[in-house]
């Protein structure tokens, strides 16, 4: 394992790194704990910095093209400069806070189809940086997320797909330069009005802003269109309400005349409604210290070994 992760930037005989997570499962607002294990090479090495970062796959939609790339959206230095002696073994413990807005990757013990997440370790030696050590991370929903997702399931909605979209939702305060869309096929009792629903959580320490995008069917004299709804919930509301009833109310409100108005004047959220990197996304990325930025074609699955299971899958 250690030999396999030998740092290519430093050649044969250079130092190696292997990061071990105490538990790869976490939730938004919690931490990822572990240690970075270093082994010295054949000669002394002046280590400039050891950095860990959360990386994921993000969809980017430009004027004429749409592509996927990996984005490091949260990073932390676990060590400053030090000397690593030949063959020296050194372990550096860390505790990485997981941002509240970190997207959900796993529900009911299964990976959401379309989601990837990893912890990448960078070792900088004499102005050379290697990012070869990448470990699986599973982000599970908070209780309020679970109740809302369960409500969609109880109402008969079927999971379709999940992805991350580069950009910001108009009027919503975000700290990350992307947002997650969890897509559902409409339940039978809504099928005459709605084709599909996209669900977005923008989470903070106080609660969750829930954004719904409903793909409405057209009528005899009207074309189909998207309708939007925004709703605030508190973490304290988890066990206080009937979530199926609440979600049903959200859907009916979103697809009502009020929802139609939101679709015309509301959030720039979803396909065809002004998505894209924008200045807001660029500024957020810079403020977070996104080192590598988006890399077109560098699919995160290529860095991981093995396959992810699907939750629901495509139909």
Image (cartoon, rainbow, N blue to C red):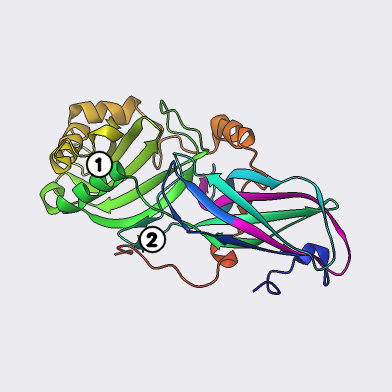
Q: Is residue 229 visible?
A: no
Where is mark 2, residue-wise?
113
Q: Is residue 41 left or right of residue 257?
A: right
Q: Is residue 245 above or below residue 183?
A: above
Q: Position of residue 71 (x, y in %)?
A: 58, 49
Quadrant in which residue 249 is drawn: top left
Quadrant in which residue 217 is drawn: top left
Q: Secondary structure at mark 1?
A: loop
Q: Is residue 14 visible?
A: yes
Residue 60 on the magenta segment = yes
Alpha-carbon neighbours of circle 1 within 10 Å: few (<14), some, or many (≥20)? few
Q: Is residue 263 left or right of residue 83?
A: left
Please state the extent of the stretch shown in magenta in the rendering.
35-61
Q: Nearer the viewer, residue 195 or 30?
A: 30
**Figure quadrant of the C terminus:** bottom left
- Give the residue displayed 88% in from the left and 61% down from the top: 44
Q: Position of residue 100 (x, y in %)?
A: 44, 39
- Give the residue displayed 42% in from the left and 58% down from the top: 114
Q: Give residue 235's mark.
A: none
- Give the residue displayed 30% in from the left and 59% down from the top: 108
* Main secondary structure type of the part rendered in magenta: strand
Q: Give residue 224's mark.
A: 1
Quadrant in which residue 75 is drawn: top right
């Amino acid at each position: 394992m250690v030999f396999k992760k030998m740092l290519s930037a430093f050649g044969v005989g250079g130092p190696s790194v292997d990061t071990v997570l105490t538990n790869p499962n976490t939730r938004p607002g919690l931490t990822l704990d572990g240690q970075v294990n270093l082994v010295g090479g054949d000669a002394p090495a002046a280590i400039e910095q050891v950095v860990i970062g959360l990386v994921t796959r993000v969809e980017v939609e430009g004027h004429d093209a749409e592509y996927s790339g990996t984005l490091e959206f949260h990073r932390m230095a676990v060590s400053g400069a030090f000397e690593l002696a030949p063959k020296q073994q050194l372990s550096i413990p860390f505790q990485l806070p997981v941002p509240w807005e970190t997207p959900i990757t796993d529900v009911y013990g299964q990976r959401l189809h379309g989601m990837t997440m990893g912890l990448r370790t960078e070792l900088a030696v004499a102005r050379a940086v290697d990012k070869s050590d990448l470990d699986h991370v599973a982000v599970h929903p908070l209780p309020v997320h679970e109740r809302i997702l369960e409500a969609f399931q109880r109402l008969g909605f079927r999971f379709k797909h999940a992805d991350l979209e580069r950009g910001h939702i108009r009027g919503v305060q975000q700290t990350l330069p992307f947002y997650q869309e969890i897509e559902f096929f409409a339940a039978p009792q809504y099928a005459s009005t709605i084709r599909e629903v996209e669900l977005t959580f923008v989470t903070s320490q106080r609660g969750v802003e829930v954004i719904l995008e409903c793909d409405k069917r057209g009528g005899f004299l009207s074309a189909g269109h998207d309708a939007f709804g925004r709703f605030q919930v508190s973490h304290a509301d988890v066990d206080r309400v009937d979530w199926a009833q609440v979600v049903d109310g959200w859907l009916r409100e979103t697809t009502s005349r009020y929802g139609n108005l939101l679709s015309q004047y509301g959030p720039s959220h979803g396909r065809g409604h002004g998505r894209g990197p924008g200045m807001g996304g660029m500024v957020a990325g810079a403020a977070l210290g996104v080192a590598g930025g988006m890399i077109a074609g560098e699919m995160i699955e290529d860095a991981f070994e093995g396959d992810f299971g699907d939750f629901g899958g495509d139909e």
